[in-house]
Image (spheres, helix red, strand yellow):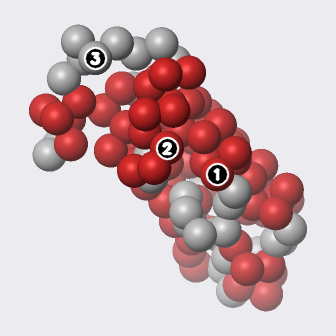
């Protein structure tokens, strides 16, 4: 997956990027999102986050809808609660609500990790 960074962008197809992020979620950092459709972008991000939840930090927040970001945030945070720090601020409460995370969880502690 990490080899994606060394492949010319012109050869980085959706299938190649999907393969890379499915083996190493952090390859999401090297995906040329401007080449893909909205559905493909979402699918790549979802695959990466499913593979490794911390990769939410590499999701380009400006190319996905709030609904898509909410879905990705729920996947990531459900695997590892401190990933809430990678959820856009305006969606954090919604993620907590939909995952039924109670306020007894001290998310302020996790924000500085």
Residue bearing mark 3: 103
> Residues under labels 3 and 2: Cα distance?
16 Å
Say which residue appears at 34% left-offset and 12% top-offset.
Answer: 102
- Give the quarter of the image for residue 67: top right
Q: Quadrant of the C terminus?
A: top left
Say which residue appears at 45% left-offset and 49% top-offset.
Answer: 90
- Among numbered discs 1 and 2, the one appearing first in the sequence: 1
Say which residue appears at 67% left-offset and 76% top-offset.
Answer: 32
Compared to residue 92, the image places residue 105 above or below, namely above
Circle count:
3
State the SS at label 3: loop
Residue bearing mark 1: 66
Q: Is residue 34 visible?
A: yes
Q: Quadrant of the N terminus?
A: bottom right
State the SS at label 2: helix
Assess disc 3: are there few (<14), some (14-19) or many (≥20) residues with their C-alpha within 10 Å of its C-alpha.
few
Judge by depth and name the residue closer to the eye, 34 or 20.
34
Q: Is residue 74 left or right of residue 79?
A: right
Say which residue appears at 70% left-offset and 73% top-offset.
Answer: 33
Residue bearing mark 2: 91
Residue 62 lies, in percent from the top left, at 59, 69
Residue 27 lies, in percent from the top left, at 56, 59
> Residues under labels 1 and 2: Cα distance?
8 Å
Assess disc 1: are there few (<14), some (14-19) or many (≥20) residues with their C-alpha within 10 Å of its C-alpha.
some
Q: Is residue 6 left or right of residue 102?
A: right
Judge by depth and name the residue closer to the eye, 26 or 79.
79
- The numbered disc on residue 25 is none
């Amino acid at each position: 997956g990490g080899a994606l960074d060394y492949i010319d962008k012109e050869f980085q197809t959706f299938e190649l990027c999907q393969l890379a992020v499915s083996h190493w979620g952090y390859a999401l950092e090297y995906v040329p999102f401007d080449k893909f459709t909205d559905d493909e972008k979402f699918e790549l991000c979802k695959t990466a986050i499913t593979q490794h939840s911390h990769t939410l930090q590499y999701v380009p927040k400006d190319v996905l809808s709030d609904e898509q970001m909410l879905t990705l945030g729920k996947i990531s945070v459900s695997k590892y609660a401190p990933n809430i720090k990678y959820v856009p601020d305006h969606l954090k409460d919604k993620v907590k609500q939909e995952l039924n995370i109670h306020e007894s969880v001290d998310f302020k502690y996790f924000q500085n990790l």
